[in-house]
Amino acid sequence: MIFDPLYLLFMAPGLILGLYAQFKVKSTFAKFKQVGFQNGFTGAEVARAILRTNDIQDVKVEEVQGFLSDHYDPRHKVLRLSPDVFRGRSVASAGIAAHEVGHALQHAKGYGPLAMRSALVPIAQFGSMSWMWLLLGGMFVAGPLGQSLIIAALVAFGGAVLFQLVTLPVEYDASARALVALRSGGILAPGADTGAKKVLDAAFLTYLAALISAVMTLLYLLVRSGLLGGNND
């Protein structure tokens, strides 16, 4: 596919936005990593403060290795923060920590899209691992069986696309909850929360780029399979 000009055309929007998003995340985090705030909390302390304020007592906060590897694990109710966030005392670390707590708040309040995303995880994992093999099988097997394998590949990849689609509102909502928590809890003063918002907006671009790439890949596969546009060359 990478030697197909049409594939490169379809993938260009997601690739360009993805590269820009990576640059924006790194540069914005680096900038606001240097900006402190009035109470000097670490990211871990910010997370625990928001959890206490919302009377969530069964979520642990742990440190995990990696650059911006922060995530919330709803199965084990663990909020894992990267070293720069867990130990950091900056506007950037506060924003990212609060964002991950936003997922814990979603979980505690039964936020529907989060539950849907969690249910889609095994489907997305299976689709991501299997669609290429199914597609290759369909390309090398003639007749109805080959066509069935191609359709199966598209369905499998569609599961991964659906996961990306559901992820977008989940991440947006978590950031919105984070900013409200930072402001209402008095953790970040007016003005300082602007930096946190910029960090979270940059991170959101990465999810948007992933969705666009997934959708454009699916459209390309539909076109090349002849299921969209009638061209199966």
Image (cartoon, grey):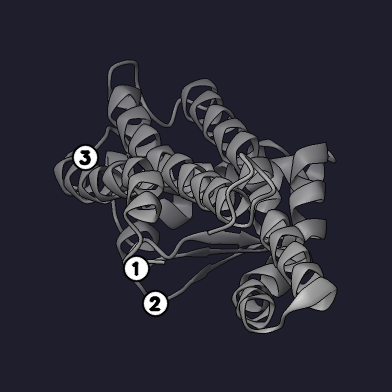
Picture coordinates of residue 219 (x, y %)?
57, 45
Residue 64: image x %, image y %? 45, 74
Q: Classify the position of the N terminus by image quarter.
A: bottom left
Residue at image mark 3: 36
Q: Is residue 191 visible?
A: yes
Side of 209 where 149 appears, left or right: right
Relative placement, left or right, of 124 versus 27 is right
Q: Residue furthest top?
A: 190
Circle 3 packing at 10 Å, graded few (<14), some (14-19), many (20+), is some
132 is higher (above) or lower (below) than 74: below
What residue type is disc 2 on?
Answer: Gln
Q: Which residue is mark 1?
A: 83
Q: CA distance from mark 3 to mark 2?
A: 23 Å
Task: Look at label 3 and name its amino acid.
Answer: Gly
Earlier residue among tags 1 and 3: 3
Residue at 33% from the left image edge and 62% from the top image edge: 87
Q: Tell me, for residue 65, which label it has, or none.
A: 2
Identify which amino acid the numbered label 1 is placed on: Pro
Residue 135 position, x and y percent, is 64, 73
Q: How would you rate the neighbour count of disc 2 (Cα within 10 Å): few for under 14, some for 14-19, many for 20 or more?
A: few
Residue 57 visible, this angle: no
Counting residues from the start of the chain, the first of labels 3 and 2 encountered is 3
